[in-house]
Amino acid sequence: MSEIIWRGVVMGIGGTILMDIWAYILHFVFKQPAPNWGPPGRWFWHLPKGKVFHDSIANATPYKNEVALGWFMHYAIGVLYGIILALVVTPLWFAEPQFIQPWIVGIVTVGAGWFLLQPGLGLGWAASKTPNATKVRVLNLVAHTIFALGMFLSALLLAG
């Protein structure tokens, strides 16, 4: 069992790293805003206090280390998704990984952002309160596909 968990950790980190590389490509090449893990960090900080949904996370009480907490939780959740993938696939999958399984996990996990994090930050369900919700949704789907690709490539490295 520990071997499966270890593989999940590696896949989650690999997927999250590739997702972050993609975010910085979008920022530096296509002039999209850089990732800002401060608001999610603030959101996570307020969760134990019983506050899940905010009208605007910017109006919530700041937390000194919210950016660090946001980055940490970003990777912790990526690792969690990697472990879930590792537990769902059969051990034989690791001998010859296929992309479809990580991609399904990647697409399903978009739901956590759309129906928990984004409304929690005050952005509405599936970013419905943002100026261009369709663009945000497409970028979310692409980012999670990139995350899935990173998990798949990590699994290939573990298989070889």
Image: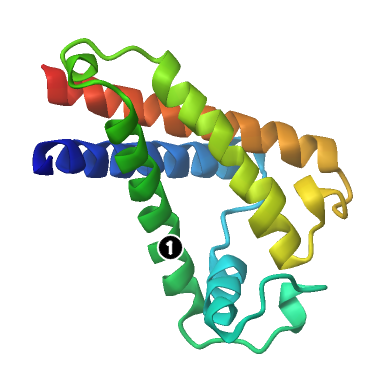
Horizontal and vertical percent position of residue 16: 39, 43
Instruction: Say if 155 sits above or below 60 in the image.
Output: above
Horizontal and vertical percent position of residue 120: 70, 65
Q: Quadrant of the N terminus?
A: top left
Q: Residue at x 33, y 12 (%)?
A: 98
Identify the amino acid type marked 1: Met
- Is disc 1 surrounded by few (<14), some (14 to 19) or many (20+) residues within 10 Å? some
Horizontal and vertical percent position of residue 54: 76, 73
Given residues 63 and 25, the one toward you in this image is 63
Horizontal and vertical percent position of residue 148: 43, 28
Q: Secondary structure at mark 1?
A: helix
- Left/right placement of residue 15 relative to residue 103 reads left
Tally the marks: 1
Given residues 89 and 95, the one toward you in this image is 89
- Left/right placement of residue 24 relative to residue 130 reads left
Q: Residue at x 36, y 43 (%)?
A: 17
Q: Residue at x 50, y 32 (%)?
A: 106
Given residues 11 and 3, the one toward you in this image is 3
* Residue tagged 1: 73
